[in-house]
Amino acid sequence: PVARPMPVKWFYGSASDPAFQDRLGLTMQALRGWKALRDGRLLWIGGTAPGFFRLEASPDLPLRIDHAPLDAAFAAIEHIRDEQVSARLATVDEPLAVTSDALRATIRVELALEHLAQGYSGVALRCWPELPDRAGSMACAAFARLGDRGLSLACEGDMAGLASMLAVAAVTGKPAVLLDLSHIEGDSILFWHCGNAPRTWAAGKTRLQAHFNRGLPAVRDMRLAPGPVCGVRFLEGRQAAVYAGRVLPRQDGYDGVSGWVGQLRWAGEPTSARGFLASVLNHRMPHHFAWGLGDAEGALLELCTWLDHQVLRPDPEEMVLQRFEHVR
Protein backbone atom coordinates (compact mmCIF):
# COMPACT_ATOMS: atom_id res chain seq x y z
CA PRO A 1 0.00 0.00 0.00
CA VAL A 2 1.03 3.60 -0.60
CA ALA A 3 1.82 5.50 2.57
CA ARG A 4 -0.16 8.73 2.85
CA PRO A 5 0.76 11.08 5.71
CA MET A 6 -2.43 13.11 5.15
CA PRO A 7 -6.06 11.94 4.91
CA VAL A 8 -7.30 11.36 1.36
CA LYS A 9 -10.88 11.27 0.11
CA TRP A 10 -11.76 10.15 -3.40
CA PHE A 11 -14.43 11.65 -5.68
CA TYR A 12 -15.85 10.04 -8.80
CA GLY A 13 -18.48 11.14 -11.28
CA SER A 14 -19.77 14.17 -13.11
CA ALA A 15 -20.06 17.48 -11.31
CA SER A 16 -23.81 17.34 -12.03
CA ASP A 17 -24.18 13.89 -10.44
CA PRO A 18 -26.24 14.19 -7.20
CA ALA A 19 -24.08 11.54 -5.50
CA PHE A 20 -20.95 13.52 -6.41
CA GLN A 21 -22.50 16.75 -5.13
CA ASP A 22 -23.59 15.16 -1.86
CA ARG A 23 -20.12 13.72 -1.27
CA LEU A 24 -18.40 16.99 -2.12
CA GLY A 25 -20.90 18.99 -0.07
CA LEU A 26 -20.09 16.91 2.99
CA THR A 27 -16.40 17.66 2.53
CA MET A 28 -17.05 21.38 2.09
CA GLN A 29 -18.97 21.42 5.37
CA ALA A 30 -16.14 19.61 7.14
CA LEU A 31 -13.51 21.92 5.70
CA ARG A 32 -15.45 24.97 6.89
CA GLY A 33 -14.98 23.59 10.39
CA TRP A 34 -11.29 22.94 9.75
CA LYS A 35 -10.80 26.49 8.42
CA ALA A 36 -12.60 28.00 11.43
CA LEU A 37 -10.23 26.17 13.75
CA ARG A 38 -7.13 26.93 11.66
CA ASP A 39 -7.96 30.64 11.56
CA GLY A 40 -9.50 30.78 15.03
CA ARG A 41 -8.25 33.02 17.78
CA LEU A 42 -9.85 32.40 21.16
CA LEU A 43 -9.64 34.26 24.45
CA TRP A 44 -9.48 32.36 27.75
CA ILE A 45 -10.36 34.64 30.67
CA GLY A 46 -9.57 33.48 34.18
CA GLY A 47 -8.87 29.86 33.35
CA THR A 48 -11.30 27.13 34.41
CA ALA A 49 -13.95 27.32 37.10
CA PRO A 50 -13.12 25.00 40.02
CA GLY A 51 -14.62 21.58 40.57
CA PHE A 52 -15.18 20.39 36.99
CA PHE A 53 -13.64 17.29 35.45
CA ARG A 54 -11.44 17.64 32.33
CA LEU A 55 -12.40 21.25 31.58
CA GLU A 56 -8.87 22.50 32.24
CA ALA A 57 -7.34 20.71 29.22
CA SER A 58 -6.41 22.77 26.15
CA PRO A 59 -7.59 21.27 22.85
CA ASP A 60 -4.93 19.89 20.51
CA LEU A 61 -6.16 21.92 17.55
CA PRO A 62 -4.68 24.39 15.00
CA LEU A 63 -5.95 27.55 16.67
CA ARG A 64 -4.51 30.38 18.73
CA ILE A 65 -5.46 30.73 22.38
CA ASP A 66 -4.74 33.95 24.27
CA HIS A 67 -4.96 34.11 28.06
CA ALA A 68 -6.21 36.95 30.26
CA PRO A 69 -6.66 37.12 34.04
CA LEU A 70 -10.12 37.29 35.52
CA ASP A 71 -9.32 40.79 36.74
CA ALA A 72 -9.30 41.88 33.08
CA ALA A 73 -13.01 41.09 32.95
CA PHE A 74 -13.73 43.05 36.13
CA ALA A 75 -11.70 46.00 34.84
CA ALA A 76 -13.69 45.97 31.61
CA ILE A 77 -16.96 45.86 33.56
CA GLU A 78 -15.93 48.87 35.65
CA HIS A 79 -15.08 50.89 32.52
CA ILE A 80 -18.57 50.56 31.03
CA ARG A 81 -20.36 53.89 31.30
CA ASP A 82 -23.91 54.26 32.55
CA GLU A 83 -25.04 55.81 29.26
CA GLN A 84 -23.72 52.73 27.40
CA VAL A 85 -25.79 50.51 29.65
CA SER A 86 -28.90 52.63 29.09
CA ALA A 87 -28.46 52.53 25.31
CA ARG A 88 -28.04 48.74 25.22
CA LEU A 89 -30.88 48.23 27.70
CA ALA A 90 -33.16 50.01 25.24
CA THR A 91 -32.48 47.22 22.71
CA VAL A 92 -33.83 44.46 24.96
CA ASP A 93 -36.89 43.15 23.12
CA GLU A 94 -37.96 40.09 25.12
CA PRO A 95 -40.17 39.85 28.20
CA LEU A 96 -38.54 40.47 31.58
CA ALA A 97 -39.12 38.67 34.86
CA VAL A 98 -36.62 41.01 36.52
CA THR A 99 -36.72 44.79 36.77
CA SER A 100 -34.93 46.95 34.25
CA ASP A 101 -32.79 48.34 37.05
CA ALA A 102 -31.70 44.82 38.05
CA LEU A 103 -30.91 43.98 34.43
CA ARG A 104 -28.40 46.82 34.22
CA ALA A 105 -25.75 44.67 35.92
CA THR A 106 -26.21 41.97 33.28
CA ILE A 107 -26.03 44.51 30.45
CA ARG A 108 -22.78 45.84 31.93
CA VAL A 109 -21.31 42.32 31.81
CA GLU A 110 -22.57 41.92 28.23
CA LEU A 111 -20.90 45.14 27.07
CA ALA A 112 -17.64 44.28 28.83
CA LEU A 113 -17.49 40.83 27.21
CA GLU A 114 -18.33 42.32 23.82
CA HIS A 115 -15.40 44.70 24.21
CA LEU A 116 -13.00 41.98 25.34
CA ALA A 117 -14.09 39.72 22.45
CA GLN A 118 -13.05 42.17 19.74
CA GLY A 119 -10.64 40.43 17.38
CA TYR A 120 -11.53 36.97 18.70
CA SER A 121 -13.65 34.13 17.34
CA GLY A 122 -14.93 33.36 20.83
CA VAL A 123 -14.39 33.70 24.57
CA ALA A 124 -14.21 31.15 27.39
CA LEU A 125 -14.89 32.84 30.72
CA ARG A 126 -14.52 31.61 34.28
CA CYS A 127 -18.04 32.86 34.96
CA TRP A 128 -18.21 31.71 38.57
CA PRO A 129 -17.78 31.63 41.54
CA GLU A 130 -16.28 35.15 41.51
CA LEU A 131 -18.38 36.92 38.88
CA PRO A 132 -21.83 36.84 40.55
CA ASP A 133 -20.49 38.28 43.81
CA ARG A 134 -18.28 40.95 42.25
CA ALA A 135 -20.47 41.97 39.30
CA GLY A 136 -23.89 41.45 40.89
CA SER A 137 -24.96 39.41 37.89
CA MET A 138 -24.73 36.01 36.30
CA ALA A 139 -23.10 35.80 32.86
CA CYS A 140 -25.83 33.61 31.33
CA ALA A 141 -28.10 36.18 29.67
CA ALA A 142 -25.05 38.18 28.55
CA PHE A 143 -23.78 35.03 26.80
CA ALA A 144 -27.21 34.42 25.26
CA ARG A 145 -27.63 37.96 23.94
CA LEU A 146 -24.10 38.06 22.55
CA GLY A 147 -24.85 34.70 20.93
CA ASP A 148 -27.73 36.47 19.15
CA ARG A 149 -25.03 38.72 17.68
CA GLY A 150 -22.98 35.77 16.43
CA LEU A 151 -20.37 35.52 19.19
CA SER A 152 -19.46 32.13 20.69
CA LEU A 153 -18.95 32.08 24.47
CA ALA A 154 -18.24 29.12 26.72
CA CYS A 155 -19.28 28.88 30.36
CA GLU A 156 -17.04 27.91 33.27
CA GLY A 157 -13.81 28.58 31.34
CA ASP A 158 -14.34 25.54 29.09
CA MET A 159 -11.82 26.22 26.33
CA ALA A 160 -12.15 22.82 24.64
CA GLY A 161 -15.92 23.32 24.73
CA LEU A 162 -15.50 26.70 23.06
CA ALA A 163 -13.31 25.20 20.33
CA SER A 164 -15.97 22.53 19.82
CA MET A 165 -18.65 25.23 19.52
CA LEU A 166 -16.54 27.09 16.95
CA ALA A 167 -16.22 23.99 14.78
CA VAL A 168 -19.89 23.03 15.08
CA ALA A 169 -21.06 26.55 14.21
CA ALA A 170 -18.82 26.63 11.13
CA VAL A 171 -19.97 23.20 9.93
CA THR A 172 -23.69 23.85 10.44
CA GLY A 173 -23.64 27.54 9.52
CA LYS A 174 -25.69 28.34 12.64
CA PRO A 175 -24.90 29.27 16.27
CA ALA A 176 -23.81 26.43 18.53
CA VAL A 177 -24.75 25.94 22.18
CA LEU A 178 -22.93 24.38 25.14
CA LEU A 179 -25.21 22.28 27.34
CA ASP A 180 -24.99 19.93 30.32
CA LEU A 181 -26.27 16.36 30.24
CA SER A 182 -28.83 16.59 33.03
CA HIS A 183 -31.42 13.80 33.14
CA ILE A 184 -32.60 10.61 31.42
CA GLU A 185 -36.24 9.67 30.96
CA GLY A 186 -37.15 6.69 28.83
CA ASP A 187 -35.11 6.86 25.67
CA SER A 188 -34.36 10.58 25.70
CA ILE A 189 -31.92 12.83 27.54
CA LEU A 190 -32.51 16.32 28.91
CA PHE A 191 -29.72 18.72 27.97
CA TRP A 192 -29.71 21.97 29.94
CA HIS A 193 -27.80 25.05 30.96
CA CYS A 194 -28.56 28.06 33.13
CA GLY A 195 -29.72 30.30 30.29
CA ASN A 196 -26.97 30.93 27.76
CA ALA A 197 -28.40 30.07 24.29
CA PRO A 198 -29.19 32.36 21.35
CA ARG A 199 -32.82 32.72 20.30
CA THR A 200 -32.12 30.84 17.05
CA TRP A 201 -32.53 27.73 19.19
CA ALA A 202 -35.83 28.72 20.82
CA ALA A 203 -39.06 26.78 20.29
CA GLY A 204 -41.10 29.88 21.00
CA LYS A 205 -41.00 32.93 23.20
CA THR A 206 -38.07 33.59 25.49
CA ARG A 207 -37.76 35.73 28.60
CA LEU A 208 -35.03 37.08 30.84
CA GLN A 209 -35.38 36.11 34.49
CA ALA A 210 -33.40 35.67 37.69
CA HIS A 211 -31.07 32.71 38.07
CA PHE A 212 -32.96 29.72 39.43
CA ASN A 213 -30.93 29.34 42.66
CA ARG A 214 -28.81 32.50 42.98
CA GLY A 215 -31.67 34.93 42.48
CA LEU A 216 -29.41 37.26 40.49
CA PRO A 217 -30.06 38.67 37.03
CA ALA A 218 -30.20 37.29 34.50
CA VAL A 219 -30.68 34.13 32.50
CA ARG A 220 -32.62 33.42 29.33
CA ASP A 221 -35.48 31.00 29.89
CA MET A 222 -36.43 29.01 26.77
CA ARG A 223 -37.08 25.54 25.40
CA LEU A 224 -35.10 24.18 22.46
CA ALA A 225 -36.90 24.01 19.11
CA PRO A 226 -37.72 20.50 17.83
CA GLY A 227 -35.55 19.15 15.04
CA PRO A 228 -32.26 17.44 14.24
CA VAL A 229 -29.12 18.39 16.15
CA CYS A 230 -25.51 17.22 16.07
CA GLY A 231 -22.31 17.94 17.92
CA VAL A 232 -18.66 17.28 18.63
CA ARG A 233 -16.57 17.45 21.78
CA PHE A 234 -12.80 17.72 21.33
CA LEU A 235 -10.69 16.06 24.02
CA GLU A 236 -7.01 16.02 24.82
CA GLY A 237 -4.81 13.46 23.07
CA ARG A 238 -6.41 14.12 19.66
CA GLN A 239 -9.67 12.43 20.58
CA ALA A 240 -13.23 13.55 19.92
CA ALA A 241 -16.80 12.45 20.54
CA VAL A 242 -19.29 12.95 17.71
CA TYR A 243 -23.00 12.62 18.53
CA ALA A 244 -26.40 13.48 17.09
CA GLY A 245 -30.11 13.25 17.79
CA ARG A 246 -33.40 15.07 17.51
CA VAL A 247 -34.85 17.61 19.93
CA LEU A 248 -38.32 16.39 20.86
CA PRO A 249 -41.45 18.60 20.93
CA ARG A 250 -41.65 18.71 24.71
CA GLN A 251 -42.19 21.84 26.78
CA ASP A 252 -41.21 20.41 30.16
CA GLY A 253 -37.70 21.06 31.41
CA TYR A 254 -35.77 23.16 33.91
CA ASP A 255 -35.46 26.91 34.33
CA GLY A 256 -32.97 28.24 31.82
CA VAL A 257 -32.26 26.62 28.47
CA SER A 258 -33.33 22.99 28.12
CA GLY A 259 -34.54 20.41 25.64
CA TRP A 260 -35.13 16.66 25.45
CA VAL A 261 -33.05 14.88 22.79
CA GLY A 262 -34.06 11.48 21.44
CA GLN A 263 -33.16 9.30 18.43
CA LEU A 264 -29.62 9.51 19.75
CA ARG A 265 -26.51 8.55 17.81
CA TRP A 266 -22.87 8.18 18.81
CA ALA A 267 -20.05 8.07 16.24
CA GLY A 268 -22.57 7.45 13.47
CA GLU A 269 -24.33 4.57 15.24
CA PRO A 270 -27.81 4.57 16.82
CA THR A 271 -27.77 4.30 20.60
CA SER A 272 -30.22 4.33 23.48
CA ALA A 273 -30.26 7.04 26.12
CA ARG A 274 -28.60 4.63 28.57
CA GLY A 275 -26.05 3.69 25.91
CA PHE A 276 -25.27 7.37 25.31
CA LEU A 277 -24.82 7.95 29.04
CA ALA A 278 -22.67 4.85 29.40
CA SER A 279 -20.39 6.03 26.60
CA VAL A 280 -20.07 9.44 28.26
CA LEU A 281 -19.18 7.97 31.64
CA ASN A 282 -17.00 5.13 30.37
CA HIS A 283 -14.96 7.54 28.22
CA ARG A 284 -14.77 9.86 31.27
CA MET A 285 -16.01 12.84 29.31
CA PRO A 286 -16.61 16.32 30.75
CA HIS A 287 -20.19 17.39 31.35
CA HIS A 288 -20.39 20.02 28.57
CA PHE A 289 -21.66 19.11 25.09
CA ALA A 290 -21.41 21.43 22.09
CA TRP A 291 -24.55 21.09 19.95
CA GLY A 292 -25.39 22.51 16.52
CA LEU A 293 -28.63 22.88 14.59
CA GLY A 294 -29.31 20.45 11.75
CA ASP A 295 -28.05 17.09 10.59
CA ALA A 296 -24.30 17.47 9.99
CA GLU A 297 -23.12 14.34 11.77
CA GLY A 298 -21.31 13.05 8.67
CA ALA A 299 -19.47 16.33 8.20
CA LEU A 300 -18.35 16.35 11.85
CA LEU A 301 -17.05 12.79 11.53
CA GLU A 302 -15.13 13.79 8.41
CA LEU A 303 -13.80 16.91 10.15
CA CYS A 304 -12.26 14.70 12.83
CA THR A 305 -10.46 12.77 10.08
CA TRP A 306 -9.00 15.94 8.56
CA LEU A 307 -7.90 16.98 12.06
CA ASP A 308 -6.34 13.55 12.73
CA HIS A 309 -8.57 13.05 15.77
CA GLN A 310 -9.67 9.61 16.85
CA VAL A 311 -13.47 9.43 17.17
CA LEU A 312 -14.46 7.65 20.37
CA ARG A 313 -16.51 4.54 19.67
CA PRO A 314 -19.70 3.69 21.57
CA ASP A 315 -18.81 2.12 24.91
CA PRO A 316 -22.01 0.70 26.39
CA GLU A 317 -22.37 -0.48 29.94
CA GLU A 318 -22.24 -4.17 29.03
CA MET A 319 -18.72 -3.81 27.60
CA VAL A 320 -17.44 -2.39 30.89
CA LEU A 321 -18.99 -5.25 32.84
CA GLN A 322 -17.26 -7.71 30.53
CA ARG A 323 -13.91 -5.97 31.10
CA PHE A 324 -14.42 -6.16 34.87
CA GLU A 325 -15.24 -9.88 34.63
CA HIS A 326 -12.06 -10.41 32.61
CA VAL A 327 -9.98 -8.66 35.29
CA ARG A 328 -11.46 -10.89 37.97
Image (cartoon, rainbow, N blue to C red):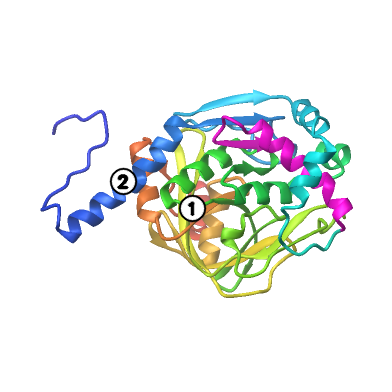
User: Residue 117, relative to residue 200: is it above or below?
Assistant: above
Label 2: few (<14), some (14–19) or many (≥20) C-alpha neighbours in 10 Å: some
Q: Is residue 3 left or right of residue 50?
A: left
Q: Residue at x 53, y 38 (%)?
A: 163
- The answer to whether residue 136 is left or right of residue 171 is right
Residue 112 covered by magenta stretch: yes
Q: Which amino acid is tagged 2?
A: Met
User: Which percent across, then down, holds residue 116?
Assistant: 67, 31
The percent position of residue 61, horizontal first and vertical second, equals 46, 31
Q: Position of residue 256 (x, y in %)?
A: 72, 60
**Mark 1 surroundings: few (<14), some (14-19) or many (≥20) residues within 10 A:** some
Prevailing secondary structure of the magenta residues: helix
Q: Which residue is mark 1?
A: 174
Figure quadrant of residue 6: top left
User: Mark 1–mark 2 contact, CB under 8 Å?
Assistant: no
Q: Position of residue 219 (x, y in %)?
A: 75, 55
Q: Which mark is residue 15?
A: none
Question: Measured along the vertical axis of the image, is residue 93 above or below residue 146?
Answer: below
Q: Height in image: 205 above or below 31?
A: below
Q: Nearer the viewer, residue 36 or 46?
A: 36
Residue where numbered disc 2 is placed: 28
Q: Is residue 171 magenta?
A: no
Q: Amino acid at mark 1?
A: Lys
> For the residue labelled by badge 1, is the local secondary structure a helix, a strand or a loop?
loop
Q: Quadrant of residue 52?
A: top right
Q: Which residue is at the front of the view, 316 or 20?
A: 20
Foreground pick, 63 / 208: 208
Seen at 76% across and 64% down, the residue is 95
Q: Is residue 141 left or right of residue 263?
A: right
Q: Which residues are magenta?
A: 99-125
- Where disc 2 sits, the SS reads helix
Marks 1 and 2, how far apart in space?
15 Å
